[in-house]
Amino acid sequence: MAEFLITLLKIFIVFGAVLGAMAYMTYFERKVLARMQARIGPNRVGPWGLLQPVADGVKLLTKESPIPANADKWVYLLAPVLVFVPALLVWAVIPFGPGFTAFGERISQSIANINVALLYVLAMTSVGVYGIVMAGWASNNKYALLGGLRSSAQVVSYEVTLGISLIGAIMLAGSMNLGDIVEAQRGTWFGFLPRWFVLPQLLGFALYLISAVAETNRAPFDLPEAESELVAGFHVEYGGFGFAMFFLGEYISMLAVSALASAVFLGGYLGPTIPFVPAALTGVFWFAAKMAIFIFFYYWLRATLPRFRYDQLISLCWKVMLPLALLNILVTAIVKLLV
Amino acid sequence: MLPLTLFFLLFAAVALFGAVMVLVSRNPVHSVLFMLLTFANVAGMFLLLNAEFIAAVQLLVYSGAILVLFLFVVMLLQRGERPLPALTQPLQAPVAIFVGLALLSELALVVLTSNVGGGTRGADTPEAIARAGGNIQALGSQLYTTWLLPFEIASVLLLVAAVGAIYLAKEDI
C-alpha cells in the first residue's frame, strides 16, 4: 500500500513538473526566437512577461472548440488525446536522480524502473503519430489530410533511425533500463573526461538528434504543419482545448526526447556534486540543465534553418541516416569485441 | 492474484470488443482504429504474462509501424462510408460459410480438448528469465543459440519478401 501511495505521489509530482516546464518552454521559445530576430519577445504580462504562459493557457481553455460539420466526430475528439497521452506516458520511465533513502525505504527517482524502458519510450513516441493522422483524416479538410499523411510517412521513417541510433549506446551499457544506462556513464576517462556516451557514440548522438527533431515534427522538419503551404496542417480545424492538447503534446514530446538524449548520451542526472545539497536534488538539477540545452538547440534550429522539401526529408532518412546508423552499430560492435 | 485476473478480464474483453468492431465497422478507417485498440490490449496481456519485451515490441512494431501504414493506405484509397460490397463471385457465400465453420470447429476442438491452465510449465519460468538477466537477455540468448536456424530462415524469408515488394513497386531497376 505504501508503495502504491509513493508511486501515486511520484506521478503527481512528475505530471505537475512536466506541465509546468511545458508552459515555460513556450515562453523560453518566444524569448529565444525574439532575441535571435533582434526583437524583445513577450514582456507585457507580469514582470518580464513571465505570466504570459498563464495568460495563453487561460485564453486557450476559455475559447470555443468547434467541431466541423462533416468531421468524423469521435475520431476528431479522440485525436488530440492520442497525441497528448503517449507524450506524457513516456515520463513514467525517465530517471530523475540516483534515488534516495527516506524513512528507511529506498525510493527510486523514476515512476517505473522497468527493464525495457528504452523500447517503451520508442513505443510511446510511435503511438503518438496516430493522433496526428486521425486529426488529419477526421477534420475532413484536404490540407489537414495532407499534413496527416506527411506526418505518418515522416514519423514512421524517422522512428527507425531514432531506434537504431540508440542501439550503440545500449550495447555500451549492456542494458535497456534507463537507470542502468545512466549509471554505466558514471566516472571519468583519463581522470577528467566524463564517461558520457556522447563521446564514443558521437555519430549515434548526431543521428539521434536529427531523428528526434523529425520525430517531433519540429522545424526544419515541420512539414506536417507547414503553415505556408498547408495553412497549419493536421490541426487546422482545431481550436480551443483541442488545439491546446496538440500544442501540449508536441512540447511534451520535445521535452521527452530531450530527456532521453540527456539520459542516454549526456549522463542523465550525473554531474558535479554541489556542496550542502543532497545528491537526489543535484541529480534533478543537472538533468534539467541538460534538457534545457537540447530545448535551446530546438529553438536555435527553428530560428536558423529553412524548412526541408518533402522528398529531401524522406531520402535523407532512408539513404543517408539509416546506413550511417547501421554503420554505427557495426563499428560499436567491433570495438566492443576488441576492447 | 485477484487484481491480475481482473486486469486480464479487462484486457481480454476490450480486445474482443475491438476485434468484433473491426469486422462490423462500415468505415475502414474505424476498422483500423479498432484494430489498434485490440493490439494495445493484447500488449497489456503480454505484460500480465511477464513478457515485457514482447509487449513493447507489439506496441512498437504492430501498433507503431504496421498499423500506421494500414491507416495510410486506407485513408488514401477510400474516403467516407461505403456499403459493404455485394458478393460477386459465384459460390462465395457457401465457401465463406464453410471456411468460417471449419475455423470455428478447429478453435473449439483446441479449447475443448486441450488442458487449458492445467498443463505443466515449460523451462522458461519467470524465475529462469530473472536468472538470465531479464526478458531481453533471455530471449536474445535463446534466439542466437537454440533457435538460430529458424531465426536465420525467418530473416531470409523477410529479406526475400522485401526484395519482391521492391521489385513489384519499381518500374525499372
Image (cartoon, coloured by chain):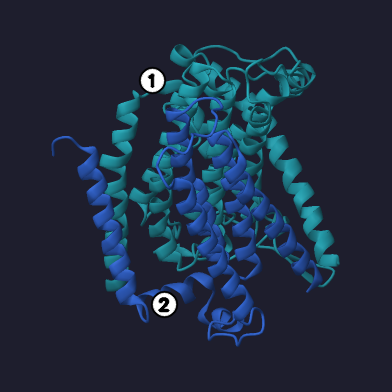
Chain colours: A cyan, B blue
Say which of A1 and A132 sits in front: A132
Residue A214 visible? The answer is no
From the image, state whether disc 1 or disc 2 is nearer to you: 2
Q: Is residue B19 above or below residue A19?
A: below
Q: Measure the C-alpha gap from mark 1 to mark 2.
A: 47 Å
Q: Are marks 1 and 2 in contact (CB under 8 Å)?
A: no
- Mark 1, chain letter? A
* Residue under the image location 46 percent in, 31 percent down: A151
Quarter-wise, where is residue A335 in the image? bottom left
Relative image position of residue A16 (x, y in whole percent):
76, 41
Judge whether A30 appears above or below A320 on screen.
above
Residue A243 figure quarter: top right
As helix, strand or loop, the secondary structure at mark 1 comes to loop
Q: Which mark is residue B141?
A: 2
Which residue in the protein does label 1 denote? Answer: A306
Please name the residue shown 63% across and 38% down the image: A82
Horizontal relation, residue A244 to residue A256: left or right: right
Residue A117, percent from left and from top: 56, 59
Tell which subunit mark 2 falls on. B
Badge 2 crowding class, 10 Å Cα cut-off, few under 14, some 14 to 19, many 20 or more, is few
Amino acid under label 2?
Ser
Residue at disc 2, secondary structure = helix
Q: Pick the residue in front: A203 or B142.
A: B142
What residue lies at 63% left-to-right and 70% top-to-bottom?
B49
Q: Where the N terminus of chain A falls, by quadrant?
A: bottom right
Looking at the rendered structure, the kind of residue marked 1 is Pro
Q: Are labels 1 and 2 on one chain?
A: no
